[in-house]
Image: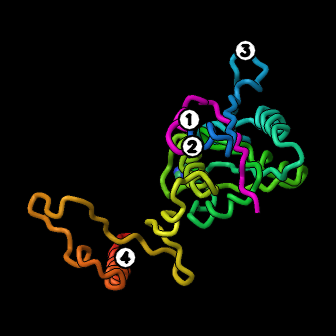
Amino acid sequence: MSSVNRFDVITIFPDYLAPLSLSLIGKAQASGLISIGIHDLRDQTTDVHGSVDDTPYGGGAGMVMSPEPWGKAIDQVAELAPGEIHELIVLTPAGEKFTQELAQELTNSKHLIFACGRYEGIDVRVSDFYSKAKNFKVREVSIGDYVLGGGEVATLVIMEAIIRLIPGVIGNPASLDEESHTLTSESGVLVEYPNYTKPKEWRGLNVPDILLSGNHGEIAKWRLEQAQIRTKNRPS
Ligand code: 6GU
C-alpha cells in the first residue's frame, strides 16, 4: 500500500514550522518523496486585525478559535490533494495520545492536514463538520500529558515520527527494525539496548567484553536481556 505523501499545516505561526526544511524531512521534500504546505490561518480572516479567536459561549477564561477561518483554510488545503481521503489531525492536549503505533497507522493516509490550535482550542464544530458533513477522517491528538502553548511543536513531533517511516526516507531501513521503541506483540514497547562505539575505554569506563567477543548469538542474547532490564527499570 502506498504511503502518505502530502502534508498541510495550518497555523497562526508559520515560522514555527521552519525546521521542516532541515535534515531528514528537508531531504524527503527535496527528493520529491513528500510535499509539505504551511498555511497562515490569518490569510483567511476578513477584519483589519486578522482576528482568529473570540470569547467562549457559556463564559469562562481564555479565548476559543473561531470556526470560519478554519473552515476556509481547510477547504483550500483539501483542494491541494484532489480525490484523496483527507485526514484532519487537530492538535489538542485533550486528544488521544500519540504513539509509535499511531505514527505507523497515519502513514497509510494519503493526505494529512494538521490544524494547530492555540488558546483554549478550536470551536469543536470544525471537527464535527469535517467528520460528519465532509467525510474526512478526523482525529484529535495530544503528544503527552503536559500543556504546550499551541499545536505547532506537537505537529513537528508527529510529522517527524511519521515521515521517517515512509519507504525511501531513511537510508538504512534496517535501523527501523532495531530502534529504541521496538513494538512487541504483547506488552507495548521494549526500549533499546545500550549502545557503545570506539574507543574501548573512555574516562575509565569499558565497553562490555561480550560486545568485543564476535559471538553474535551471545551478543543478541545479552542485548535482549539489557533491553528487558531497561524497560522494567524505566520510570513511566
Ligand atoms: Cl497537541 N497541544 C497543546 N497545546 N499542548 C499539548 C499537546 C498539544 N500535546 C501535549 N500538550
Contact, mark 2 vs mark 1 (Cβ under 8 Å): yes
Cα–Cα span, label 1 and label 3: 31 Å
- Which of the two marks, 2 or 3, is nearer to us in this view? 2
Cα–Cα span, label 2 and label 4: 29 Å
Instruction: Give the residue displayed 17% in from the left and 64% down from the top.
Output: 200
Cα–Cα span, label 2 and label 1: 6 Å
Q: Which residues are magenta?
A: 1-25
Reading the image, the residue beneath label 3 is 48
Residue 150 appears in which quarter of the rendering? Answer: top right
From the viewer's perspective, is 206 left or right of 8? left
Q: Which mark is residue 21?
A: 1
Cα–Cα span, label 1 and label 4: 34 Å
* Quadrant, the N terminus: bottom right
Contact, mark 3 vs mark 4 (Cβ under 8 Å): no
Reading the image, the residue beneath label 4 is 227
Crowding at dot 3, Cα within 10 Å, few <14 / some 14-19 / many 20+, comes out as few
What kind of element bears circle 1? helix
Instruction: Give the residue displayed 77% in from the left and 52% down from the top.
Output: 110
- Which of the two marks, 2 or 4, is nearer to us in this view? 2
Instruction: Give the residue displayed 26% in from the left and 74% down from the top.
Output: 211
What kind of element bears circle 3? loop
Q: Earlier in the sequence, mark 1 or mark 3?
A: 1
Crowding at dot 1, Cα within 10 Å, few <14 / some 14-19 / many 20+, comes out as some
- Residue 170 pos. (x, y %): 54, 53
- Residue 157 pos. (x, y %): 53, 49
From the viewer's perspective, is 225 left or right of 61? left
